[in-house]
Amino acid sequence: MKVLSVVGARPQLVKLAPIAAAFAATEHEHVIVHTGQHYNADLSDVFFSGLGIPDPDVHLGIGSGSHGAQTGKTLAALDPVLAEQQPDWVLVYGDTNSTLAGALSAVKQHLPVAHLEAGLRSFNRRMPEEHNRVLTDHCADLLLAPTGEAMRHLATEGLANRSVLVGDVMVDVCLRVRDAVLAGTQARPELPEGIDPEAPYLLATLHRAENTDDPERLAALVAALADLPVPVALLAHPRLLARANEQGLKLAGGSLHVGRPLPYAALVAAVLGSVGVVTDSGGLQKEAYLLDRPCTTLRPETEWVETLHDGWNVLVPDPAALGHTGWVSTATRPTPEAPRGEPFGDGRAAEQVVRVLAEHVRR
Ligand code: UD1
């Protein structure tokens, strides 16, 4: 079997790591195509080197642009690559513009498409990611779902007969890296200047268009983070820096300390060193959960509803509600005591993905 993975943005590289490792342990051929949606070393290169992912076989060098331009350029660039490679499966990951372009290029050429992380829904049609994942699910041939909840969404949309529950490959990589961090084999993370790693701090990220692109909302979020009662280590995504710069907004100040995005192992170490996470990232909500840290999510909804049980994750859509609500600060609340289940699987999802792809290959 020959499988061609299309990746392009940071979260896809994290998911690619366990998948590439699972393929490497088999006879199957695995081709990696990097669209170049993310091109900063901090968002791309460090994930290949840090997670031991083989270099991409093809790099399309697409870069930034409006949604249409970025998706369209990727689609056009993928056509000849897929035509030449003729894989048994085109494997697309998650919800980015690279995912949608990969799925479209493949289905138009009658190449079978499998969607990893299928069935996630925010039900918020203002999010570009929601369109990407819904469209990808509906055109793909095989839907690899991470959770029972995702399977239910797919069934509701009439897609049950194409769906298989495989678990979440992010668990595979997160737990493996956590164990390496706890074993002391990883260097200490480079936290933003002014953050004392021995003292309590919150780890924060902010990059979603809904939060960064409205100047009033971004200013309110930054002010709320700066007002928190413990230091906040903000790992700033390039989109956040670009929008803040355009809007003349200063990010650092008060409790807020600004640094660069971290490579994956350093991020896991930084979460483990923190007293909690504040974020609008999908992946980081789950990583906080898997690493036993309370998470506060700066969005009105989450696709990862399992993290909300017992207060492990709390949604805070209104920036004004982030700090002191009554006597307790939401962001600095203590770690819940309730035990967590394994809603995202047992950390062996990547092997399951390879097995399911092989079982469903068209002869
Ligand atoms: C993308 C995904 C999002 C994912 C996120 C992870 C889409 C629609 N969004 O959002 O689902 O959670 O990646 O990071 O696909 N930029 C750089 N250097 C880079 C990449 C981006 O400077 O390497 C800046 C550019 O100003 C660019 C902006 O970030 O215009 C947005 O990048 P883009 O890829 O469109 O979306 P992300 O916000 O990264």
Image: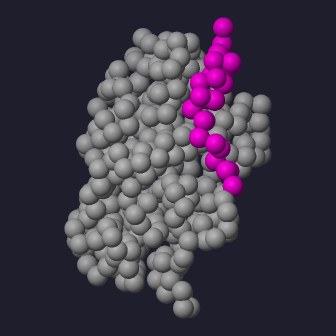
Up-down: is 109 above or below 129? Answer: above
- Confirm whether the magenta stretch covers residue 360: yes
Q: Nearer the viewer, residue 264 or 207?
A: 264
Residue for point 56% across, 91% down: 326
The percent coordinates of residue 89 (x first, y second) are 56, 20
- Pick the residue in front: 336 or 89: 336
Give the residues drawn in magenta, as a range: 341-363
The C terminus lies in quadrant:
top right
Can residue 285 be seen in this snapshot? no
Magenta stretch holds residue 42: no
Q: Is residue 159 something that shows in the picture?
A: yes
Looking at the image, residue 334 sits to the left or right of residue 205; the answer is right
Q: Relative to 3, does residue 182 appear above or below in the rendering? A: below
**Quadrant in which residue 346 is drawn:** top right
Q: Which quadrant: the N terminus?
A: top right
Looking at this rendering, what residue extends furthest in the bottom direction? 327
Residue at point 39%, 55% (across, down): 269
* 317 on left or right of 150: left
Q: Nearer the viewer, residue 256 or 118?
A: 256
